[in-house]
Image (cartoon, rainbow, N blue to C red):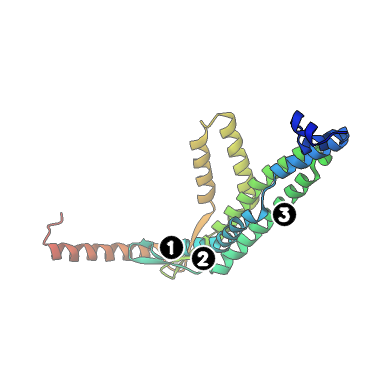
Amino acid sequence: SWGPGKYYEEDITPQEEYEDLLTEEELELLGEMEEEEDLYINPYLFIPFGVLLLIYCALLPYFDFISNRFIVRNSRFGNGAFSFSATVGDFYRLYGKWFAATAVLVLIWVAAMMAGDKDIAFFPILMLLTIVFVGGTRAYFQSRRTNILLQSTRLAQHHQLAGYIPFRGLFWLMVSNNFMVAITLGLMGPWAKVRTARFMLERIQLVSEESLDGFVEQQSNEASSLAEEVADVFDLDLV
């Protein structure tokens, strides 16, 4: 037995005396509990980040919509103005599909992380699934977004942009481009950009309800008249 005198004489703390009475298994369990306490992160710290993320996701489709509408409505071909007929709902539906698919992938990752070492063989498959998901969603989003812009843009109310960017074709284009850029260490980057631009432009059309030659001639005459009026104002001699 030990008394107060012995305790102070040998500088044995109550914690050390308590640990001497524990078995090895109990000591290991106590050490794990102390490590978990050291690694504990208050989940409430993520609430502000979560709120900001929700606000960002809620406003992103709207900002994309108004940005494209502003660009199209302020574009001109001569004096002919472009119009934009897409609605904000078109963008929210497209972004909603993207957000939903991303949420499903995140839940799969969370479930795999919670399983820990039990399903360790599933992680390579999950990594491959993530790579395919990122490439597939990017191709789907870009193709559908481009289709919305094309089908909603008109020139001078008589000329409609038309076209359809297929998802599968764009997905294969991205896969092959990335593969060539990767194996050449970036040297084929310009080739990939030209290939993508050609793929897009070959699928864009202009549907006209009247003669394009007459429209171009009209815009040219209006531009010439405007130039002459400006020259008269500044008293310039145009050759």
Residue 26 appears left or right of 199: right
The picture quadrant where one finds residue 119 is top right
The picture quadrant where one finds residue 21 is top right
Q: Residue furthest front?
A: 5
Counting from the top left corner in percent of width and height, residue 227 is at: 21, 62
Q: Which numbered marker is on residue 104?
A: 3
State the separation of the CA atoms marked 1 and 3: 34 Å
Q: Which residue is mark 1?
A: 72
Q: Are marks 2 and 1 in contact (CB under 8 Å)?
A: yes
Tell me the amino acid under the disc marked 1.
Answer: Val
Q: Which residue is mark 2?
A: 152
For marks 2 and 3 on the same chain, the one whose residue lies earlier in the sequence: 3
State the separation of the CA atoms marked 2 and 3: 31 Å
Q: Quadrant of the C terminus?
A: bottom left
Residue 158 appears left or right of 6: left
Tell me the amino acid under the disc marked 2.
Answer: Ser
